[in-house]
Amino acid sequence: MTRIDLHSHSSVSDGTDAPAEVIAHAVTAGLDVLALTDHDTVGGIKEASQHLPPGFTLVPGMELSCAHEGSSVHLVSYLFDPDSPALAEELRRVRSDRAGRAEEMVGKLQEHGVDVTWERVLEIAGAGHAEHADANTIGRPHLARAVVEAGAAKNVQDAFDRWIGSGGPAYASRYAIDPVRAVRLVRAAGGVCSLAHPARAEGATNGAVPVALAERMVEAGLGGIEADHPSHNRPQTKFWRGVAADLGVVVTGSSDDHGALTGHRLGARTTAPEAFEELIAPATGVPLLRG
Ligand code: AMP
Ligand code: MN
Ligand code: MN
Ligand code: MN
């Protein structure tokens, strides 16, 4: 049975393992297919592609952070051409705003007496992967680790709860794309996409993506819904499987592994081979990468 995990992060964004290490862990976890989906960047794909054992398939991907009425909606995207001008320009804007926003949050933390520095946050975000520097994305997990080091939170989760979660005293919002537009951009770049962890949309009323929005995303070319995700409980998984069936798109399942940050969990959820084939059938941007 082919084991397929379509959502993972490396140290190029907010995961803790370098792209090559993510591949090594995926092999150990018994996976045959892995999508590397760092936040708003494909900066880790090249390194990952150079470490594929025979028979292993890497799906080049990315998790796009989108915003809908003040809530955060994530889109896992695959096999698009990253040099497609409209998408590439949007990604540069998103990454640059991420950096500005993180610096703003450091300022807010300092105003609240938390002893973090911008230099230290950059060090945590860049540690061990300077070669990806132009494509790295900085995220709140990097800030959270600095807050923990400064003794102002017990752990990363506590740092989100006390300081940097949506609405927290040191939270700042950032530029993000409208989700329907994001689906169109990915499709125009020859890619395909799935709605990531729809039961977890930070800042949304009742915490989930509105079904009406998912429907509009499907009309724009969304091909899947990530109903199987470690943060979804059974009723949520069942609900979103039903939505996928109603809207006529496939169900994807993924670990959303961030290395040590989430507890290594590659393969904790997987995608059925038939669903994977159906999802990627329309893709024309770049090919699958095989070891
Ligand atoms: P950002 O993309 O900078 O807004 O940060 C969002 C990232 O932070 C997500 O991709 C998760 O990796 C992580 N995250 C979000 N909420 C939490 C939380 N409550 N506890 C721990 N990590 C979180
Ligand atoms: Mn993340
Ligand atoms: Mn996400
Ligand atoms: Mn993710």
Image (cartoon, rainbow, N blue to C red):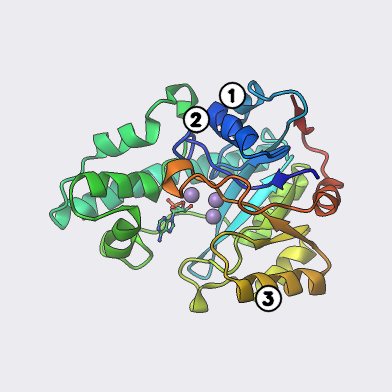
Q: State how far apart marks 1 and 3 are (Cα).
A: 37 Å
Label located before the other in sequence (1 or 3): 1
User: Badge 3 is on which residue?
Assistant: 239
Using the rendered view, name the quadrant where residue 61 is placed. top right
User: Badge 1 is on which residue?
Assistant: 47
Circle 3 packing at 10 Å, graded few (<14), some (14-19), many (20+), is some
In this view of the protein, which residue sits in the foreground, 168 or 273?
273
Asked if residue 14 shows in the view, the reply is no
In this view of the protein, which residue sits in the foreground, 214 or 257?
257
| Quarter of the C terminus within the rendering | top right
| Quarter of the N terminus within the rendering | top right
Whether ligand 2 has any atom under 8 Å from the Cβ at mark 2 is answered as: no
Q: Secondary structure at mark 3?
A: helix
Assign ligand 1 to one image quadrant. bottom left
Q: Position of residue 87 (x, y in %)?
A: 65, 43
Q: Position of residue 149 (x, y in %)?
A: 22, 44
Q: Are marks 3 and 2 in contact (CB under 8 Å)?
A: no
Using the rendered view, name the quadrant where residue 2 is placed. top right
Q: Secondary structure at mark 1?
A: helix
Residue occupying image coordinates x 78% and y 57%: 223
User: Badge 2 is on which residue?
Assistant: 18
Q: Secondary structure at mark 2?
A: loop
Amino acid type indicated by mark 2: Ala
Residue occupying image coordinates x 34% and y 68%: 167
* Above/below status of 183 relative to 188: below
